[in-house]
């Protein structure tokens, strides 16, 4: 493999990925949740998000997993080395909207800092 092929392969590896949770097998779900957990922990600290926005039990709620996963994908795309200078602003604009959704959804779930309510089956 020549240098250009190697660089191309590495670039594909580090490109932001969109996770389609529906298509993952159980082992991949576990792996992706662990990676998402790392990012969510960082984001909660970095953006000083409280438990009313990101519940401690977020990983038990599909809608919260989907929203946080989408945010992580956008964050990865907007903060790459080759991102345009306006991309971080794009992320923060979308973050504002996502935090509103997360707060609303979290309030409807009935969970708190110390208790978890399972999702209702529809």
Image: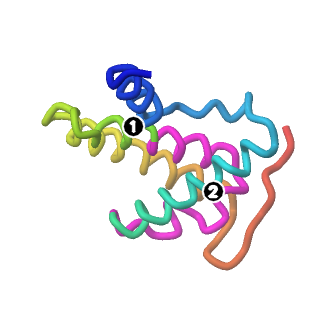
Tell me the residue at 73%/51% (across/down): 30
Using residue 60 as the reference point, say whether residue 3 is left or right of it: left
| Residue lying farthest to the bottom in this orientation | 114
Q: In the displayed orientation, state which residue is furthest to the right.
A: 121
> Which residue is rendered at x = 73% and y = 42% of the image?
28
Circle nearer the N terminus (2, 1):
2
Residue shown at the point (64%, 71%) measured from the top left: 112
**Distance between mark 2 and mark 1 Cα atoms:** 18 Å
Q: Residue 53 at x, y = what percent? A: 49, 60
Residue 115 drawn in magenta:
no
| Mark 1 crowd level (few <14, some 14–19, many ≥20, 10 Å Cα) | many
Q: In the image, is residue 54 part of the stretch drawn in magenta?
A: yes
Task: Give the secondary structure at mark 1.
Answer: helix
**Residue at 64% across, 47% down:** 32
In the displayed structure, does residue 79 sit left or right of residue 27? left
Which contiguous range is marked in magenta?
Answer: 47-72
Q: Is residue 88 above or below residue 34?
A: above
Q: Secondary structure at mark 2?
A: helix
Q: Quadrant of the C terminus?
A: top right
Residue receiving disc 2: 34
Q: Nearer the viewer, mark 2 or mark 1?
A: 2
Between 90 and 118, which is closer to the camera in this rendering?
A: 90
Mark linked to residue 74: 1
Quadrant in the rendering for residue 16: top left
Residue placed farthest to the front in the image? 1
């Amino acid at each position: 493999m020549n240098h250009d092929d190697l660089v191309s392969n590495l670039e594909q590896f580090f490109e932001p990925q969109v996770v389609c949770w529906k298509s993952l097998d159980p082992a991949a779900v576990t792996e992706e949740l662990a990676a998402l957990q790392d990012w969510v922990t960082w984001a909660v600290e970095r953006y000083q998000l409280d438990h009313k926005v990101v519940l401690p039990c977020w990983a038990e709620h599909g809608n919260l997993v989907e929203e946080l996963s989408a945010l992580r994908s956008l964050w990865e795309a907007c903060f790459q080395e080759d991102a345009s200078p306006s991309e971080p602003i794009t992320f923060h604009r979308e973050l504002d909207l996502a935090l509103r959704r997360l707060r609303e959804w979290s309030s409807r779930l009935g969970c708190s800092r110390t208790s978890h309510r399972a999702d209702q089956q529809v």
